[in-house]
Amino acid sequence: MDREELILREFNLYPLWQQRRKAAPAFTEIASEVTQLIVPQGDNVEPQNNHTGNIKELNWSQLESAVKNCTACSLRAGCTQPILGAGAEQVDWLIIGDVPSAEEDIQNALFVGQAGMLLDNMLAAIKLKRSSNVYLTSLIKCHPLDGRPTAVEEIAQCLPYLERQITLIQPKLIVVLGKLAALTLLGSNTAATTLRGKVHDYQGIPLIVTYHPDYLLRAPLEKAKAWQDLRLAVSTMRGRT
Ligand code: SF4
């Protein structure tokens, strides 16, 4: 058994990956989900800034405090606490999801439970570990009550926190696991089918979009594509180091 087979077996991709390598990529299922979350075209209204200070000037501890005490949008009323993220403050790999789930809200941590275990396995396969060489965060810091869709205004209020995190971390590569985060960071509201499988650019940082582990738990046949994306991420990172 070669090393690749061992890795693929570890997170349940073998022999699926072997079979699906030959198959044409399809992204239709995620695309249909994305259409519910896309910022409407032409809705580029400049939102009112509900923050009291300039988020662009905050250091890490100030940012943590600002997020902890934030009430800039209505999401705060329905969550237990905002979740900034976790990991070393300066790492090469930044992983971004969409919104905290109810379980994450209760545990005050991102990527927990079954999805978290799957993510840990995926990261381990490319020699990453959440507590050491990767930072995990999300686009929206507060769990939307009842899992309701996030409003454009709420995204606009919370996005500056993520932007500040990216500036402070200065990652060499961003991997986006959420559809909403991908569309927001890339300023895209079309063609979610084209987001996977390529290297995008976010302000000079390569950005790769792949499936959220929650989605992979619901659609395990797509794990092979996630593995393709991770391989793309690794090869992209090699070109940056
Ligand atoms: S979602 Fe973001 S902007 Fe809204 S209250 Fe929570 S931390 Fe503040």
Image (spheres, rainbow, N blue to C red):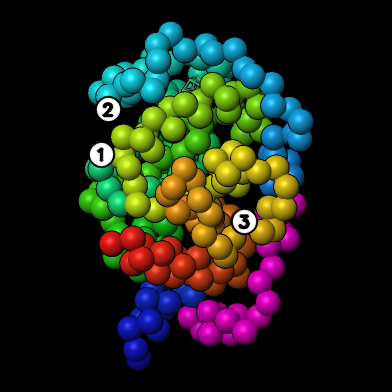
**Residue toward you, 37 or 185:** 185
Residue 24 belongs to the span the image colors magenta = yes
Q: Quadrant of residue 80?
A: top left
Question: What residue is at 61 percent from the left and 34 percent from the top?
Answer: 147
Identified at 36% across, 66% down, the residue is 239
| Callout 2–callout 1 Cβ contact below 8 Å | yes
Res. 15 in view: yes
Element under label 1? Answer: loop
In magenta stretch: residue 129:
no
User: Measuring 68% from the left and 53% from the top, which residue is drawn there?
Assistant: 192
Task: Identify the residue position indicated by label 2 in the image.
Answer: 60
Q: Amino acid at mark 1?
A: Glu
Which label belongs to residue 64? none
In which quarter of the view is residue 68 placed? top left
Left or right, 58 with respect to 110, comes to left
Range of residues picked out in magenta = 14-33
Q: Quadrant location of the C terminus?
A: bottom left
* Mark 2: few/some/many CA within 10 Å (<14, 14-19, 20+): some
